[in-house]
């Protein structure tokens, strides 16, 4: 993607940190915000390079808690992930005919998995 390996590794760490911060806060981030989190790379929102970076972070992070952390990355105009997210889900055998419903269930799983647990808390967050 035209960046030195050391910069790529730093960008992965920065993207992961941005995703984990939002996961723990029960929030999402836009592709633009993700691109800003790794601004040294010059990757544009929704570029193939940014998608490759997100894919690498997800391959490392998803098995940790058994959720799809990419569920947190959404488009500004729709508030849900882009077509690639749903194409991936379909390839994995999921029914995405109700995109909003599918995404809401997946993003809630992420929030629940990363929620800071308070004593007596159920860990459920609203959106």
Image (spheres, rainbow, N blue to C red):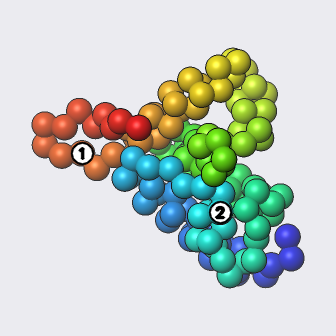
Image check: 108 left or right of 29? left
Which residue does the numbered mark 2 point to in the structure image?
A: 32
Q: CA distance from mark 2 to mark 1?
A: 29 Å
Image quarter in which the C terminus is found:
top left
Image check: 101 left or right of 95? left
Quarter residue 9 falls in: bottom right
Question: Is residue 38 at least partly visible in the picture?
Answer: yes
The disc at residue 26 is: none
Please state the horizontal and vertical placement of residue 28, each as a whole percent of the image: 50, 50
Which residue does the numbered mark 1 point to in the structure image?
A: 117
Please state the horizontal and vertical placement of residue 49, each as a whole percent of the image: 80, 63
How many C-alpha atoms fall within 10 Å of the one at disc 2: few (<14), some, or many (≥20)?
A: some
Q: Secondary structure at mark 1?
A: loop
Residue shown at 47% from the left, 40% from the top: 110
Q: Secondary structure at mark 2?
A: helix
Please tell me whether residue 50 is drawn above or below residue 40 in the rendered image: above
Please state the horizontal and vertical placement of residue 101, each as a whole percent of the image: 56, 23
Residue shown at 62% from the left, 47% from the top: 74
Question: Is residue 88 at least partly visible in the picture?
Answer: no
How many C-alpha atoms fall within 10 Å of the one at disc 1: few (<14), some, or many (≥20)?
A: few
Please tell me whether residue 45 is drawn above or below residue 109 in the rendered image: below
Please state the horizontal and vertical placement of residue 90, each as a whole percent of the image: 75, 25
Residue sitting farthest toward the front: 77
Mark closest to the chain's N terminus, 2 or 1 = 2
Please tell me whether residue 39 is drawn above or below residue 53 in the rendered image: below
Looking at the image, do the residues carrying marks 2 and 1 touch, with CB atoms under 8 Å apart?
A: no
Name the front one of labels 2 and 1: 2
């Amino acid at each position: 993607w035209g960046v030195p390996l050391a910069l790529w590794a730093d960008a992965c760490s920065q993207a992961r940190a941005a995703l984990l911060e939002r996961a723990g806060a029960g929030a999402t981030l836009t592709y633009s915000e993700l691109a800003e989190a790794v601004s040294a790379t010059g990757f544009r929102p929704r570029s193939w390079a940014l998608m490759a970076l997100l894919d690498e972070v997800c391959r490392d992070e998803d098995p940790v808690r058994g959720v799809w952390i990419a569920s947190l990355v959404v488009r500004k105009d729709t508030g849900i992930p882009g077509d690639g997210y749903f194409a991936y889900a379909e390839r994995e055998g999921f029914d995405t005919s109700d995109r909003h419903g599918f995404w809401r269930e997946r993003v809630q799983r992420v929030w629940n998995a990363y929620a800071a647990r308070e004593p007596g808390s159920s860990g459920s967050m609203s959106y």
